[in-house]
Image (cartoon, coloured by chain):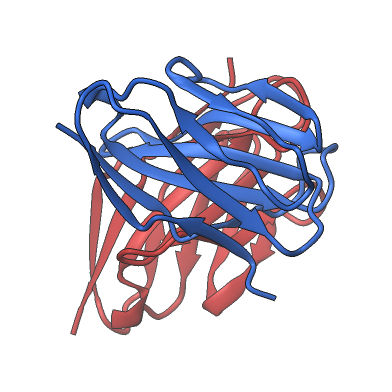
Amino acid sequence: NAGVTQTPKFQVLKTGQSMTLQCAQDMNHEYMSWYRQDPGMGLRLIHYSVGAGITDQGEVPNGYNVSRSTTEDFPLRLLSAAPSQTSVYFCASSYSVSGGWETQYFGPGTRLLVL
Amino acid sequence: AQSVAQPEDQVNVAEGNPLTVKCTYSVSGNPYLFWYVQYPNRGLQFLLKYITGDNLVKGSYGFEAEFNKSQTSFHLKKPSALVSDSALYFCAVRAPGGYNKLIFGAGTRLAVHP
């Protein structure tokens, strides 16, 4: 298994540009999520999904869109990039959606710089 | 509101000495607590978790954590530190509302010196 994969590894955008961060997992996990990591703030949840066709907002959803058309893929879209979105983005997945005790598996991250 | 605090930005320890990385939490209901580690330029890796049962939880790479309900703490420990343990450590608690949403602490950087 490749686990959780993310592309690209690094991206530079200009303010106002749009882009999609890709996330895929090959473990047949129901639950997938996106976090952003900023210095001194840990990881904060952006959006999450409990299955294909079902998504919901996390702690910091503004400026980001998600969709989940398949179990494997969970792309994160930045509609109009802003410097405040400069961050490292992590995708994570876990097998089941309920309970809250599931171990989550993280991708290697995408480092985004918005100028 | 659920929250996690890691009071130390950095912990320095000599190789071979015991290490402790502190974490305190605030939750309503039963706490589900986790420790993750992040090595440079890598994603987070699961170390261990407390759901219920024994207060001392053993995890990967020789790490363990002690759950203390009265002090609302979940400190990460290792009897003998290795230079390769140097990394960023995150404590996390299950967020309210179910599912597998996590609330992370700010992280503690562990530096183990030879």
Position in image of residue B81 (x %, y %): 36, 78
Could you tell whether A48 is left or right of B3 in the image? right
Q: What quarter of the picture does the C terminus of chain B occupy?
A: bottom left
State the residue at coordinates (66%, 53%). A104
Front residue of A73 and B113:
A73
Relative horizontal placement of residue A45, taking residue A70 as reference (left or right): left
Which chain is assigned blue? A
Give the residue displayed 78% in from the left and 45% down from the top.
A70
**Residue A15: image x %, image y %?**
21, 24
Q: How many marks?
A: 0
Viewer-proximal residue among B18 and A110: A110
Q: Quadrant of the N terminus of chain B?
A: top right
Residue B97 at x, y percent in the picture: 75, 20
Q: Above or below — where is B75 with respect to A54? A: below
Residue A106 in the figure: left or right of residue B33? left
Q: From the viewer's perspective, is residue A3 above or below residue B44?
A: below
Residue B105 visible in the shown view = no
In the image, which lettered chain appears red? B
Instruction: Indicate whether B94 appears above or below B38.
Output: above
Please tell me which residue is depicted at 32% across the width and 64% down the height of the picture.
B41
Q: Give the residue furthest to the left.
A: A115
When asked about the image quadrant of residue B59, the answer is bottom right
Confirm whether residue B2 shows in the render.
Answer: yes
